[in-house]
Amino acid sequence: MSPFSRLLSELRRRHGLLQKDLAELVGIEQTYLSALETGIKGPPTPDFVARLQKALNLDANAIKALEEAVDNSQRKMSLSADAPEEVFEVFNEFRRQLDTIHPSQLQLFRMALALKGDLNEGQFNEIPRIKRRSKKNIEDV
């Protein structure tokens, strides 16, 4: 289930509405709302989001959460035509294995992506190297 699907269902229930009632308030078919809640349909248009915000009279925090959920629920990506070949290779390797990725691998991906911020901020700490003893130092011991 996508973040948007989960949040949409949660918002509807929090407001005590059935799918058919919310669909009517937003001006869509109940079947479309159901498809959004189950994740069959991808994230909706900005127009739908605006109508949902208005229909449920959402506060600023709920609107921000809704917008983040929409953004985090995107299913399609495109690469820049001038991306390096290595980016294409990694992207497609990821795409091919997406359905079988283990949660541990996801955690590693997140850690790797977080490195970008550290690298941009110059917070890279070099790993200290172990000093090897030279023959001279060993003989002195």
Image (cartoon, helix red, strand yellow):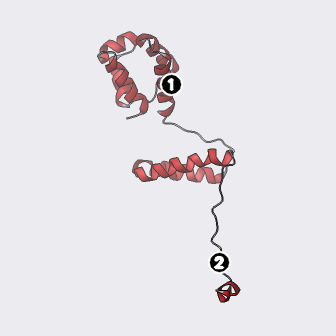
**Picture quadrant where residue 140 is located:** bottom right
Along the line of sight, the residue nearer the viewer: 14 or 55:
14
Q: Is residue 18 left or right of residue 104?
A: left
- Residue 138 numbered tag: none
Secondary structure at badge 2 equals: loop
- The answer to which of 77 and 18 lies nearer the viewer is 18
Rendered view: 71 above or below 138: above
Element marked by disc 1: helix
Disc 1 target residue: 67
* Mark 2 lies on residue: 132
Q: CA distance from mark 1 to mark 2?
A: 55 Å
Image x and y of residue 46, in percent: 52, 20
**Amino acid type of the residue that numbered disc 1 sits on in the rendered structure:** Glu
Q: Residue at x 35, y 24 (%)?
A: 10
Foreground tag (1 vs 2): 2
In this view, the residue in front, 124 or 79, is 124
**Looking at the picture, does residue 93 appear above or below residue 36?**
below
Looking at the rendering, which quadrant does residue 33 occupy?
top left
Q: Position of residue 1 (x, y in %)?
A: 37, 35
What residue is at 57 percent from the left and 47 percent from the top? 113
Picture coordinates of residue 68 (x, y %)? 50, 28
Under mark 2, the amino acid is Arg
Q: Is residue 67 left or right of residue 121?
A: left
Mark closest to the chain's N terminus, 1 or 2:
1
Q: Is residue 69 above or below residue 121?
A: above
Residue 119 in sight from this viewpoint = yes
Query: Which residue is found at the position 51% from the left and 47% from the top?
Result: 110
User: Which quadrant holds the C terminus?
Assistant: bottom right
